[in-house]
Amino acid sequence: MTYHHLRNATAVIETETEYILVDPMLGEEGSIEAFTYKRFPPLRNPLVALPDQASGVLDKTTHALITHQHADHLDEAGIDFLKERHIPITCSRLDADALKSKGLHVVQELEYNKAVSFLGGTIQGIPATHGYGKVAELMGNVMGFFIELPNEPSLYLSSDTIYTQDVKDIISKKEPDVSVIPCGSAQLDEHEPILMTMVDILKFVEDCKGQVICNHLEAINHCPTQRKDLKNNITLDTVWIPEDGAKKDYT
């Protein structure tokens, strides 16, 4: 498996037979409104352009995974891309109708905690809690994915979540070979953080036996944690903090 990190949570998972696009935010720099106006500078999103390498790997897309509908995971440009190419999509049952109404080609609707067939292997929807306390209710439903494909390392895409018992159960019981977690510690103008704090990022890394990929960094205006902050706190060679456009092979 080769993991192509494009920007924020947008990535392409390259396997022996597939190119699986995850959460396509594909719009130009500044094409989405700011997510905070008081707590952090009210800059329009995304803060950075897609890397030059993006178009080449995106052109190979054979399937897509959508974890939830927030604009930093699925924007108008991402919707247009999926529609124009009629890309088959796997998503949560709770998002399926809304995505279909946008003209997207949803072929698989997942329940939480139920493994089903997927591209010759299996996929399981994993609960994700998008924030600490009551803000999680405001953020709506989110689904992570645990994926096992033939001749590939097992992969846990946590999506936007804090470090909950559901997350702990996945890494302790399933022991994924590779986990992708959001590390930007995002906050809105009100409420508690909506992604893992640095404390919980470090707990996840300590508890996880496999490789870890850190995403959700330096692309959205409500994410204060930067790559340098992670590098100052994490020295394990099992943790990858990719630059936009970087790729890494996992066997």
Image: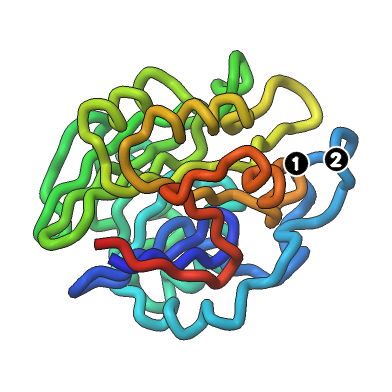
Crowding at mark 2 (Cα within 10 Å: few <14, some 14-19, many 20+): some
> Which amino acid does the dot numbered 1 rest on?
Pro
Q: Position of residue 118 (x, y in %)?
A: 16, 54
Label 2: which residue? 40
The C terminus sits in image quarter: bottom left
Nearer the observer, 24 or 109? 24
Q: Position of residue 199 (x, y in %)?
A: 60, 25
Query: Residue drawn at (48%, 73%), measured in percent from left and top?
Result: 81
Q: Position of residue 186 (x, y in %)?
A: 67, 37
Crowding at mark 1 (Cα within 10 Å: few <14, some 14-19, many 20+): some
Query: Residue drawn at (50%, 32%), measured in percent from left and top?
Result: 161
> Which amino acid does the dot numbered 2 rest on?
Phe
Q: Is residue 61 visible?
A: yes
Query: Residue drawn at (63%, 44%), measured in percent from left and top?
Result: 230
Label 1: which residue? 224
Camera-nearest label, 2 or 1: 1
The residues bearing labels 2 and 1 have C-alpha atoms spaced at a distance of 8 Å
Mark 2 and mark 1 lie on one chain; the one further toward the N terminus is: 2
Nearer the observer, 100 or 169? 169
Say above or below: 54 vs 77: below
The part of the image, by quadrant, that contains residue 110 is top left
Nearer the observer, 233 or 245? 233
